[in-house]
């Protein structure tokens, strides 16, 4: 099983996690600190990090931003990734194949249901961002207006496919 496959398996079983870290011996960790600490005990101390977005098969929707860089929310990577040290590890078991496929489909169905009820006027930024990520949409940036435009565009695509 490749590291990317292990990461996909990890994300299928840990719905709330957005990143994982895999040591050279194939162990999967929640936090980079724990992974690096363990890696220091190995001959090869390499740690490869994966995000849910890079492991997922994203749906490509490109939305051009019409506002200047000074406008909008402009959250450029301001998430604190280092404070999430849960101190546990996952050894990447390989025996959950068919179970994981069903849960990924279920997650996508839940995200599509949320999109049907999506109202940009009352949605909070964190909800918008989570929905974009759950649907696997690629956007130019993480500004609220860009994310909303991507969701609205995807909603039109979904509605068009359903009507055909």
Image (cartoon, rainbow, N blue to C red):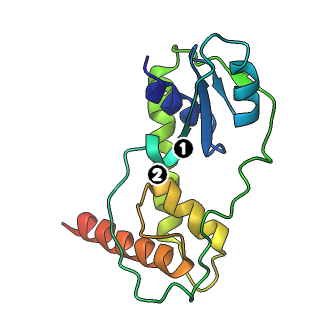
Report the quarter where the C terminus lies. bottom left
Residue at image mark 1: 51
Q: Is residue 161 above or below residue 44?
A: below
Q: Nearer the viewer, residue 3 or 128?
A: 3
Q: Residues within 10 Å of mark 2 (few under 14, many from 20)?
A: some
Q: Which of the marked residues, 2 or 1, is nearer the chain's N terminus?
A: 1
Q: Is residue 58 above or below residue 140?
A: above
In the picture, measured across the screen, residue 91 lies left or right of residue 5, that is: right
Q: Residue at x 51, y 15 (%)?
A: 94
Residue at image mark 2: 109
| Secondary structure state at the residue bearing disc 1 | strand
Work out whether residue 31 can be spotted: no
Q: Residue furthest left?
A: 164
Q: Residue at x 53, y 72 (%)?
A: 117
In the picture, measured across the screen, residue 154 lies left or right of residue 10, that is: left
Q: Nearer the viewer, residue 129 or 78?
A: 78
């Amino acid at each position: 099983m490749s590291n990317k496959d292990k990461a996909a398996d990890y994300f299928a079983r840990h719905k709330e996690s957005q990143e994982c870290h895999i040591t050279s011996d194939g162990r999967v960790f929640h936090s980079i600190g724990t992974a690096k600490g363990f890696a220091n005990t190995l001959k090869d101390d390499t740690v490869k990090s994966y995000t849910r977005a890079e492991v997922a098969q994203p749906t490509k929707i490109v939305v051009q931003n019409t506002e200047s860089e000074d406008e909008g929310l402009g959250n450029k990577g301001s998430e604190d990734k280092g404070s999430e040290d849960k101190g546990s590890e996952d050894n990447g078991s390989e025996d959950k194949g068919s179970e994981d496929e069903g849960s990924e489909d279920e997650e996508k169905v839940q995200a599509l249901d949320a999109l049907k009820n999506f109202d940009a006027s009352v949605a909070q930024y964190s909800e918008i961002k989570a929905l974009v990520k759950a649907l696997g949409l690629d956007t130019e940036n993480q500004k609220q207006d860009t994310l909303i435009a991507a969701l609205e565009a995807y909603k039109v695509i979904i509605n068009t496919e359903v009507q055909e």
